[in-house]
Amino acid sequence: MTIEVVDKNKNCIKVGPIKGFSLIKTLECGQCFRTQKTSRGTYIIIAYKRVIEVWQMADYLYIKNTNVKDVTQIWIHYFDLERDYNNIYCKIGQMENMKEVIEYSYGIRILNQDINEVLTAFILSCRNTIQSVSNMIDRLCQKYGNKILYDNKTFYGFPDLNILSSLNHEDFVEMRFGYRAKYFKDIYSNLIYHSGKYDRTYFLSLKGIGNKIADCILLHTGLDRSVFPVDVWISRILKEKFQCMSNKYAEQSNFGKKIFGEYSGYAEIMLFYYARTKRCLFRLRVV
């Protein structure tokens, strides 16, 4: 994989070739909340207090509004480009009932996202749509985040933890965080002083974070790719394809981990994308 500056004036860099990568599926599979598709067919990504514009041509990823240092230190890791996903697809594709899922979901990579933003987003995701979560995160960033100018537009980075920990319950109510507003003050205050491991035990010790949210944080920050988060889509496909009829989170998650082992997180996001976008194929009623 090479890194090539293709337009110095526009700070555009070409990365590749990248095998087993689909930018569209990666950004539209439901794992991130702060991307915008442009009329040009490109994507705006706001992450790590930066704004980039990205698109894909064949096996190459183009990143605009960046530099070689950031591509090397941030974006290659963010897109998980150094991992051999073809090997992962091959391993999962050999497992029971997964061939069609892999063929449909081929190209998805799990993004390595900022822990504070991921934690916030997945707490807010409970009983909310992806768009609703995006709107709540945007409101928080617009009021407390750093201003970033790009393409004659203003964007906002995710606020620093020291700012978030200084807010009170009423500030989060103002952001229209709903019943979850009561959790954030204590969570951010705990995070700012935490010096130990970021593991499942730690996240479950924070009031407002349960099993599903803890697993989502671990998966989407890259802390643990062997977790198997379960939401309504995963629950449905476990019933449909694997005859796992339990409705208990722990039993469903353990069922997935028993099948997929160290590849559980990768399998989960592919199953989620498959179930959510091919839901018309399911016999189960979608509500």
Image (cartoon, rainbow, N blue to C red):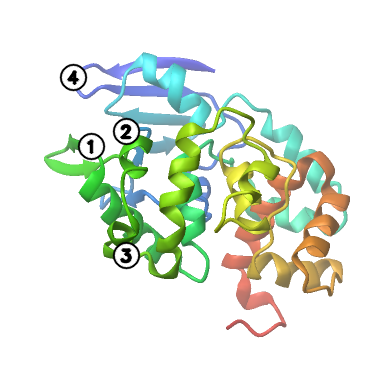
Question: On the image, numbered disc 1 is attached to which residue?
Answer: 146
Question: On the image, numbered disc 2 is attached to which residue?
Answer: 49
Image vertical order of residue 166 relative to residue 68, above or below: below
Indicate the amino acid at tag 2: Lys
Q: Quadrant of residue 165?
A: top left
Q: Residue at x 33, y 51 (%)?
A: 37
**Cβ atoms under marks 4 and 2 closer than 8 Å:** no
Place of residue 124 in the rendered image (x, y in percent of width and height, measured from the top left): 46, 60
Mark 1 and mark 4: span between their CA atoms?
Answer: 24 Å
Indicate the amino acid at tag 4: Asn
Mark 3: give few (<14), some (14-19) or many (20+) Cα within 10 Å: some
Place of residue 202 in the rendered image (x, y in percent of width and height, measured from the top left): 64, 42
From the image, state whether disc 1 or disc 4 is nearer to you. 1
Question: On the image, numbered disc 3 is attached to which residue?
Answer: 173
Closer to the camera, 261 or 178? Answer: 178
Nearer the N terminus, badge 2 or badge 3? 2
**Cβ atoms under marks 1 and 4 closer than 8 Å:** no
Q: Residue at x 43, y 37 (%)?
A: 56
Mark 4 and mark 2: span between their CA atoms?
Answer: 21 Å
Residue 49 seen from this side: yes
Q: Residue at x 53, y 42 (%)?
A: 22
Nearer the N terminus, badge 1 or badge 4? 4
From the image, state whether disc 3 or disc 1 is nearer to you. 3
Question: On the image, numbered disc 4 is attached to which residue?
Answer: 9
**Split into 4 quadrants, where in the image is the N terminus?**
top right
Nearer the N terminus, badge 3 or badge 4? 4
Indicate the amino acid at tag 1: Asn
Q: Residue at x 29, y 61 (%)?
A: 170
**Cβ atoms under marks 3 and 4 closer than 8 Å:** no
